Structure formats: structure tokens, C-alpha cells
Image: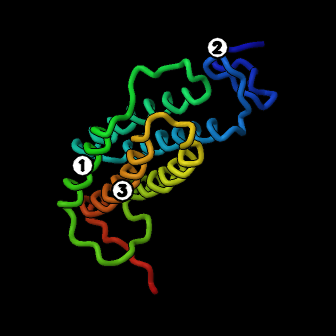
Amino acid sequence: MMSRFYTGLGDSGYSSMLGRKIKKSDSVIEAIGNIDELNSFIGLAMACIDDDRLSIALKSVQENLFIIGAELSSVVNERFLPKHKISPVKVTELEKIIADTASRLPDLNRFVLPGGSEASAYLHVSRSVSRRAERSVIRISSKLKNKSIIPYLNRLSSLLFVSALYMNKKEGVDETNPSY
């Protein structure tokens, strides 16, 4: 019995994407999956964030991650042209948000352990997933037409880091430093 929520087509280890059959273990599928996982963790972090400025920024990030997923899909079928693309302007936008968020923080002169408030902990998890997503996109970078995707993902992990620090500060939670 088929459902509108599954087709069963993937039971053999393949996925259908843009009219092409592709192994689920393909590096493009891995990169798309990592971007999807990152988007989900950002959504989880947002559920704990009570800060309009940061919530608006992260919602924009989520929308941009959907665009990146579409762009990665175009690697499978070059005839597919995504309607939207990540541009250098999007990288600059992240840099401005990073600078604004960092300006609200004290100087950082030691490493910090991931954690603190619930929102901060989820942002740290999002940051580490972002780094994995970036590495998986780099593995397929020779197939990408848009060279702004990797800088965007690189800045995104920085944004998630300063956002984690910001949420700890906002919620009055001290950063924990390694004991070495």
C-alpha cells in the first residue's frame, strides 16, 4: 500500500531526483542530507530562542539553506536551473550579522566548551553540523557552478558560534572554558 508520504522507491538504495536515479550513498545526496539536517537543527535552536533579531536572521538562513539544497540538486541534473541562487550578497549579509552579534559580546580570549543555555547548546550543535555540511559540499565543489555556497556555509558556522555565545550572555549563563 502506498501513502502520499512515501513511495517505496528508495527501498533499493536509490533516490529519484529531478528525473534521475541516484544512489543514496552518492556524495551529492550526502551533501543535500547534511544541509537538510543543519536546517532542522537550526529550527530546533530557534524553538528555544527568544530574540527577534536572531530569530529573523536564522529564518533567513533556513530559507537560504533550502536554496542551497536546490542548487546542490542541480548537480544531479544540469538541466534543472534553480529559481534562486546564493549570491555573494548573502555572504556579506551573514558577515554583517556576525559583526553585529559579536559587537554585543565581550572579547573572547579562551576556547569555550559547547553548551550553556538550551538555546546556546542547540546553536553549538548546529555549528558542528554546519561544519560537516560544509565539508560534504566541498567534496562535490568541482561539480558546483555557484562558488558562493562554500563561503556562505563557512560564514554560517561563524554566525552560529557567535549566536551561541550571545544567547549565553543574554540568558546570564557563563561560558565554560576547558580546564587545561
For disc 2, the neighbor class at 10 Å (few under 14, some 14 to 19, many from 20) is few
Q: Amino acid at mark 1?
A: Ile
Q: How many labels sit on residues?
A: 3
Q: Earlier in the sequence, mark 1 or mark 2?
A: 2
Q: Nearer the viewer, residue 2 or 109?
A: 109
Which residue is found at the position 28% from the left and 41% from the top?
57
Q: Are marks 3 and 2 in contact (CB under 8 Å)?
A: no
Drawn side of residue 111 relative to residue 136, left or right: left
Q: Position of residue 153 (x, y in %)?
A: 42, 47
Q: Which residue is mark 3?
A: 158
Q: Nearer the viewer, residue 143 or 164?
A: 143
Q: Earlier in the sequence, mark 3 or mark 2?
A: 2
Q: Position of residue 66 (x, y in %)?
A: 45, 31
Q: Which residue is mark 1?
A: 97
User: Which mark lies nearer to you, 1 or 2?
Assistant: 1
Residue 163 falls in which quadrant of the image? bottom left
Q: Amino acid at mark 3?
A: Ser
Which residue is found at the position 24% from the left and 49% from the top?
97
Q: Give the SS element for disc 1.
A: helix
Q: Which residue is mark 2?
A: 4
Marks 3 and 2 sit apart, C-alpha to C-alpha, by 39 Å
Residue 109 falls in which quadrant of the image? bottom left
Marks 3 and 1 sit apart, C-alpha to C-alpha, by 10 Å
Q: Position of residue 45 (x, y in %)?
A: 40, 47
Q: Amino acid at mark 2?
A: Arg
Colouring: rainbow
